[in-house]
Amino acid sequence: MRKKIVAGNWKMNNDLNESINLISAIKKGINENNTNVDVIICPPFTSLETAYALIKNTTIKLGAQNMYYEKNGAYTGEISAGMLLSVGCEFVILGHSERRTIFGETDELINKKIKSAIQAGLKPIFCIGETLEQRERGEAFEVVDDQLKKGLYQVSNEDIKNIIIAYEPVWAIGTGKNATPEQAQEIHNYIRKQISAMYDSLTAEKLIIQYGGSVKPENSKQLMSMPDIDGALVGGACLKADSFISIINSAV
């Protein structure tokens, strides 16, 4: 049985003091005896080192929101996998729709980042998903398939085991809309079938596929009760400890 994983993507929110306060509140509310759900927090770069110091004796794990594929060099403003590892990160979000749409990241760039992260020892949370226009044109499956194949190009059978896939319908991110549990399950099941075809059935069965897109305490239990939804990549609702804890508890 696959373990549920709930990750909080803080995006460009919370300065250092706000991060300390939020982590402290999450620590107080979390059930350390709960072994059925893994929890990941992904603060901004400026809070990562402090966040790790606060969570290192807990079950909470640390992730970053982005990285560059080169190890070092003249890449002003970028962060490498090694830098993330040095401050305690285990995970990194790659391919998020905001990186694709706002910053123009391509499937090819995301693929380089995924391979670089894995080579360094980080576990990517690889985001895929269609826009509203693509869904309305009936292209959701085609888009997801294309992003999967390009993003995982030359990623080996061994390396795919260290990747979490997050399906995030772009039309449901920050819009208040969300895919119904049935709509999300349909795509998650499709992703699992595509992974089976690309790799093998056992790899597909073990793969963690999160849902991301306006996940809230009100809908999280219904979403995560679907057979192919293995947790959540939470945006706005993770910025308040009580709502994030509620989502974590609903995954139990």
Image: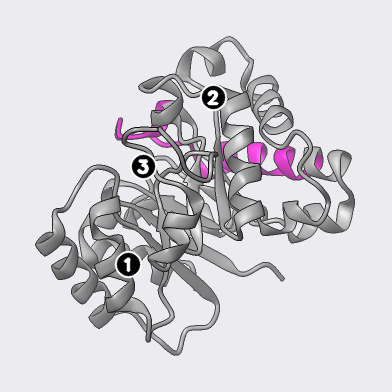
Q: Whole-Å distance between the Cαs marked 2 and 3?
A: 15 Å
> What residue is drawn where x is 64% and y is 34%?
111
Q: Which quadrant holds residue 116? A: top right
Query: Relative to residue 31, is residue 115 depicted above or below?
Result: above
Query: Relative to residue 42, is residue 60 depicted above or below?
Result: below
**Whether residue 222 is visible:** no
> What residue is drawn where x is 45% and y is 43%?
67
Label 3: how many residues lie within 10 Å, few (<14), some (14-19) or many (20+)? many
Label 1: how many residues lie within 10 Å, few (<14), some (14-19) or many (20+)? some
Q: Which quadrant holds residue 166? A: top right
Q: Whole-Å distance between the Cαs marked 1 and 3?
A: 14 Å
Residue bearing the label numbered 3:
214
> What residue is drawn where x is 48% and y is 67%?
251
**Colour pattern:** one colour
Residue 182 part of the magenta segment? yes
Total labels drawn: 3
Residue bearing the label numbered 2:
130
**Whether residue 144 is visible:** yes
Q: Earlier in the sequence, mark 1 or mark 3?
A: 3
Q: Amino acid at mark 1?
A: Ser
**Measured from the top left, where is residue 157 in percent x and y?**
83, 51
Q: SS class of the residue under badge 2?
A: loop
Identify the residue at the far front of this view: 73
Q: SS class of the residue under badge 3?
A: loop
Q: Amino acid at mark 3?
A: Ser
Query: Relative to residue 103, is residue 225 depicted above or below?
Result: below
Query: Relative to residue 121, is residue 198 depicted above or below?
Result: above
- Where are the magenta residues, as a range? 171-193
Observer-nearest of 188 and 101: 101
